[in-house]
Image (cartoon, rainbow, N blue to C red):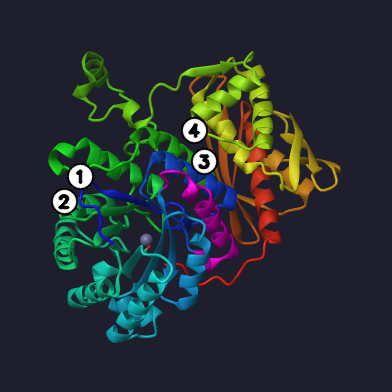
Amino acid sequence: MSQQQTPGVRIFDTTLRDGEQAPGISLDVKEKLEIAEQLARLQVDVIEAGFPITSQGDFEGVRAVAGTVGTAGGAPVIAALARCHPDDVSRAADALKPADRSRIHVFLSTSEVHRTAMLHGASEDEIVRQAVDAVRRALTYTDDVEFSPQDATRTDVDFLMRIVDEVVEAGATTVNIPDTVGYAIPHDFGTLIADVVARVGADVAVSVHCHNDLGLAVANSIEAVRNGAQQVEVAVNGIGERAGNCSMEEVVMALATRVDLLGRPTGVNTREIARTSRLVSALTGYPVQFNKAVVGRNAFAHESGIHQHGVLADRLTYEIMRAEDVGVAGAQIVLGKHSGRHAFTRQLESMGYTLAKEEVGRAFARFKELADRKVEISDADLEAIVADEVYATDDDAFELVWTQLSGGTATAPSATVRVRRTADGTEIDEVAIGDGMVDAVCGAIRRAVGIDGTLVTFNVAAVTPGVDALGDVTIQVEVGGQRFTGRGVSTDIVEASARAFLSALNKSVRLRHRAVAATPETP
Ligand code: KIV
Ligand code: ZN
């Protein structure tokens, strides 16, 4: 297959695969789909949706993304990861079957330390044999096959070049050079990529996949692009193993802002960046640091008088990008108390959301409830409601009916909750005392549902400015050694916390009911 010879850089998004490998993140099928739909709106070129052999849930996630996002007009390529094992490859192919355009991404460790510690000391010849077999096998399912020599940057260069030659000969259409442990330094990495590009020829795309252990993932990726890489692998908000992956928003905006120097734009619709970042943060439970480049709360904020003066006179004094170009600015007031269901649905559609009928019903009820407490509802509020509804699914085991709080600084805080068991409609009331209101309400819910969940992380953010802002609570709860993310929004922080806590417990129930296939180690 001949690769495009445009100067553009392809964006391969691995938020749903490598990003999801970050500690404590576990996205269910519905959440994966929601993120994949947003990645399609962002117009990335490839979505790596998962690693199907690892679990039934991952298989279903890839299949759902392939069957919906992967079949829409102009859809991105949907990719799935596989080790160089026949079963992995066929499982990936099965999961990808519904997609219009699919890619099988096979990987195998090549560095000596990995081969010794993880592959029983497999010889170079053996590694080459397995890689070539896997590429050939993958090509029987799709003409789009990517190969990654894992830990490439700590692999003997001669062996790296040998395996690159062999997989290209076997028919790989993309060769990815992963800096698996974030070991590379830009200048050096650029030289390596230039060598690989010169070697593979025009019909094979060279890709890079940089981890951020030394904070250099974006710099290394840009240096690779300068040296001819055609694809960059990224994750939204830079999430991923350890210090994470190359951040999508940073690399895309660097390529856009310095197109004068690099001449290598991407096809990403940058105006969708902020929304994508918020959605991924909400569904993964990973907050975005205030000073994070491009999408942090302070990325376009000016504090000192001198800076404010400069920006008011001419924003170019202190801004190299326009906030509106990344979708940050101008969350307009869109709806209010008197807006009807039609206006509500139209607004969601104009924002790119298409919800199922029952989801619209639930979201509209939440909107009306909110409109009674908050005069003006913005795009950001609507987004928060929609993301909240992604958590509340029809198969939730429990739903929150109400919470009641008492106590204050002089008396111990106590909370009463009513929870409905959805299977039979039974309502359960429980009360608990806690160190604070949030602790009390979580204690009462824990008793009502009979699940011993421990609150591990707790983040609260205001969706918009103002005292009537929606509070957006994202938490991680540990149940039986496994972490679940929950999210809740409300103008009342304690109620938002209760919703978030219950949504995490509901996920633990759902997982218990799901059959999980054998889980090999992830890369
Ligand atoms: O970091 C890594 O090496 C990977 C590969 C599977 C590409 O994630
Ligand atoms: Zn990786």
Gap between marks 2 and 3, in whole Å? 34 Å
- Residue 56 higher or lower than 427, as above or below: below
Q: Closest to the observer: 459 or 60? A: 60
Q: Sequence order check: which comes first, mark 2 or mark 4?
A: 2
Under mark 3, the amino acid is Ala
Instruction: Please give the residue where the numbered disc 4 appears in the rendered image.
Output: 352
Q: Nearer the viewer, mark 2 or mark 3?
A: 2
Q: Nearer the viewer, mark 2 or mark 4?
A: 4
Can residue 285 be seen from the camera position used here? no
How many numbered callouts? 4
- Residue 375 higher or lower than 134, as above or below: above
Q: Sequence order check: which comes first, mark 2 or mark 1?
A: 2
Q: Secondary structure at mark 1?
A: loop
The dot on residue 226 is 2
Q: Are marks 2 and 1 in contact (CB under 8 Å)?
A: yes
Instruction: Where is residue 223? Give x, y as percent.
Output: 18, 52
Magenta residues, as a range? Answer: 52-75
Under mark 2, the amino acid is Arg
Membership of 71 in magenta stretch: yes
Placement of the C terminus among the 4 image quadrants: bottom left
Gap between marks 3 and 1, in whole Å? 31 Å
Instruction: Please give the residue where the numbered disc 3 appears in the rendered image.
Output: 282
The dot on residue 292 is none
Q: Closest to the observer: 10 or 448? A: 10
Q: Is residue 364 left or right of residue 203?
A: right
Under mark 1, the amino acid is Arg
